Amino acid sequence: MAKFPISRRTVLRGAGAALGLPWLEAMKLEAMTPQAQAAARTKTGSPKRMVAMYMPNGVHPDMWTPAGVGRDFQLSPTLAPLEDLKSEIVVMTNLWNQASRGGDGHYVKISGFLTCTTITKTLGVDINCNGVSVDQIAARQIGKQTPLPSLELGITPVSTGVDRNVGYTRVYGSHIAWSGPTMPLAREVNPRLVFERLFRAGGPQGNTAKQDVALLDGVMDEARQLSQSLGQADRHRLDEYLTVVRSLEERLERASRPEQSSWKPKKALDPAQKPAGLPKDHAEHVRLMMDMIALAFQSDTTRIATFMFGNEVSNTNFAFLDGVKGAHHSISHHMKEADALRQYQLINKWHIEQYAYLLRKLRDMKEGDQSILDNSMVLFGAGIRDGDKHDPHNLPVVLAGRCGGRIATNRHLVYSPDSPLANVYVSMLDAFDTPVERFADSTGKAVGLLA
């Protein structure tokens, strides 16, 4: 233990930089009201976290649902990447968002995914989701306890214009987090900017890439001083954390300045082959965003996050996957053609692999005798089941993490057909210590989800 207890709000400070700390055994609970402590801490003193992750365009329906019920279940081909995390997850079958049953094929499903409400049909002047998303219900109660009330992330910039096929503004396809009926929350899609937002005291200092990225250089002296006052376990935890931060800084630097890489081509490149635009590695982009969420939680910069793998109707080209040779939305309209269905399932499985990547990172981040995953809820889902049918019934939904012992994991919960998705959100809010009596069309808590 440290010679003196350390406040949970302690940060490392240096020239133009401030870096939040991970959980340490030496940290003490700040003076708070009993209600605030209940909302912010588990019984072990660690904060609870909530993530909602959205995948566009639905799933191959025959490759999603596990076999078996309750604890006696086997993961499906699409969910197979979660095998080593099986004890940490709950798969839920037969949920739907009743409010999304009408309207177009996509936009009503995505914008209402976390609100369970029906959006107003508009060309863009008067957007309205007619509700508040579940993440923001939680943020209203505990968001003031962290530097950022919540963190909204995505991969693709907000879509603009009107989808003339259905008469909806494309803006709806870019948002799942709503702080109010007419207030979709802006998402950050640049991982470098997310990193700077999380850990810099203000805006980036100076005008060079080195100054903008090398955050640790400004706080290392204070980190060394702090380390001298910590016990062995805390010193190890702090060193591990700083190593992760440095690794992310280096990755972001390489991504933004590829010409500085030590790699050299075996053959000179033809300048005529230069791409017209800036090439983007979609897989690395997604992984960096997963790392940002994990780092935000580890530093307690925020406890609530949402992430969109893509805007609805996303047509990201997944040719980087072996066996896939097309774009996501196009492939999702498979028309039951065997090869299209095969490719569709591979894209679904890739998304689950990224979900599993985040879960493992959170599992490996320790807080005392627990992990950050133990104290989190990480929701993965889509607003439609079969992308070819735009089917809102039996949504693909997985929840991971025990949220401080409040979620009963390692099970497949099969509800009666068309059970409200909103019931899951009522249970999640209860587990997060931000309870509500009702959410949208909820009829109660989701049976079997809470421990």
Image: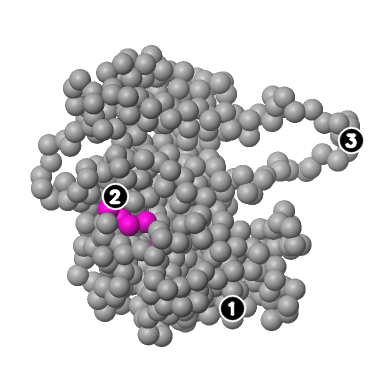
Q: Which residue is mark 2?
A: 48
Q: Earlier in the sequence, mark 1 or mark 2?
A: 2
Q: Residues within 10 Å of mark 1 (few under 14, many from 20)?
A: few
List x then y, in percent, for residue 332: 65, 71
Q: Secondary structure at mark 3?
A: loop
Q: Read off the magenta span.
A: 399-404
Q: Secondary structure at mark 2?
A: loop
Residue drawn at x 50%, y 23% is 214
Query: Amino acid under label 2?
Result: Lys
The alpha-carbon separation of the residues under discs 2 and 3 comes to 52 Å
| Furthest-left residue in this view | 33
Quadrant of the frame with the N terminus: top left
Name the disc covering residue 270, or none. Answer: 3
Examine the image and state in which quarter residue 181 appears.
bottom left
| Furthest-front residue in this view | 72
List x then y, in percent, for residue 159: 57, 57
Query: Amino acid under label 3?
Result: Asp
Taking depth in this image into account, of 160 and 385 the one nearest to the observer is: 385
Task: Answer with left or right where residue 395 lies relative to residue 350.
Answer: left
Taking depth in this image into account, of 246 and 143 the one nearest to the observer is: 246
Query: Amino acid under label 1?
Result: Asp
Q: Does the stretch in magenta take in 401?
A: yes
Name the disc covering residue 124, or none. Answer: none
Examine the image and state in which quarter residue 105 appears.
bottom right
Residue drawn at x 55%, y 71% is 76
